[in-house]
Image (tube, rainbow, N blue to C red):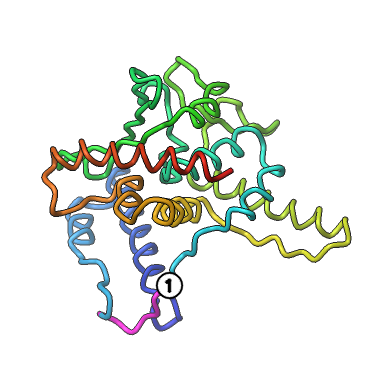
Amino acid sequence: MAARGKSRQGILKSTGHIRQMFAWGVAQELLKPDQLVSIRALQPVRYGAIEAPESKPLPPVPIPLVKATLPFLNEHTATMVKVQLLTGMRPGEVCALRLNDIDRSNPDCWVYRPLHKMRHLGRERTVPITRPVQKMLEPFLRADGKCLFSLQSVRCDANETYDNHSYRRAIKHACAAARSAQRKAGLAEDHENWSPNALRKAAAQHTANLASLDDARALLGHADKELTQRHYAKQDLVKATAAAKLMAVNLL
């Protein structure tokens, strides 16, 4: 893969797909379990281990570009974009947002607790949902346990929820529609593509600018090794809530 010019990050993603293929093969009894154990034992390619280029870091999406894209998104995806930008959620977290996972005991600030990859280590991810974001979510609240946002298309069941791929694809199509509108208006087609992950980067950048780098870390849910788990969970929610309120006032 490296010889063909694939980046190290691309190699990691591709080898992850291969592991998934082997796991499926074992589940279908097409492969022996020890083959899956062997392939999972392979260590990921570390930085500098092979001669493969590094992927360029994803820059944050400019806020004016986000605003210019919103009119070309449907009601669900436009709200997902605004919620993600103002909370720093991961794309998968906004796609999986359910009423059951939101603590609404404090009217001033709800708390969303999505499943977190480090939950087995006792770390809990908490996402503050301030009043401006609450108002965005209110039309989509549903008590049936399903995700708040669903695909809105004549080709899809209205209850089919978004995932990372369909969410990213919706934004890509909206960017293409924006360029088409520019072309029809006789303008330069300069509306660039951007992805949901770039929204999270934008949330981090603007929180750091408006508050501090530590507030940005708290909003995004990154761990600080110097804090105990108990102190981490308590203080990060306070910092993240303050950062989210600043974002709601200054963006969109």
> Which percent across, then down, holds residue 136?
55, 29
- Image quadrant in which you'd find residue 111: top left
Which residue appears at 18% of the width and 42% of the height? 232
Q: Which of the 4 image quadrants contains residue 37?
A: bottom left
Q: Quadrant of the N terminus?
A: bottom left
Q: How many marks?
A: 1
Residue 38 screen position, x and y as percent: 18, 61
On whether residue 53 falls in the magenta region, the answer is: yes
Question: On screen, 110 above or below 1?
Answer: above
Q: Judge by depth and name the residue closer to the eye, 229 or 179.
A: 229
**Image point (33%, 34%), residue name:** 114
For residue 215, side relative to residue 203 (left or right) = left
**Relative vertical location of residue 205 with respect to residue 130 in this rendering, above or below:** below
In this view, the residue farthest toward the top is: 143
Which residue is nearer to you in this view: 118 or 137?
137
- Give x and y (percent) for residue 36: 23, 55
Q: Is residue 232 left or right of residue 78?
A: left
Residue at the disc numbered 1: 55
Under mark 1, the amino acid is Ser
Residue 88 in percent (x, y) is at: 42, 45
Note whether 190 is above or below 126 in the view shown. Answer: below
Magenta segment range? 49-54
**Residue farthest to the left, as pictured:** 228
Q: Is residue 197 magenta?
A: no
Q: Is residue 100 left or right of residue 247?
A: left
Determine the residue positioned at 45% across, 23% down: 146
Mark 1 crowd level (few <14, some 14–19, many ≥20, 10 Å Cα): few
Identify the element where label 1 is drawn. Answer: loop
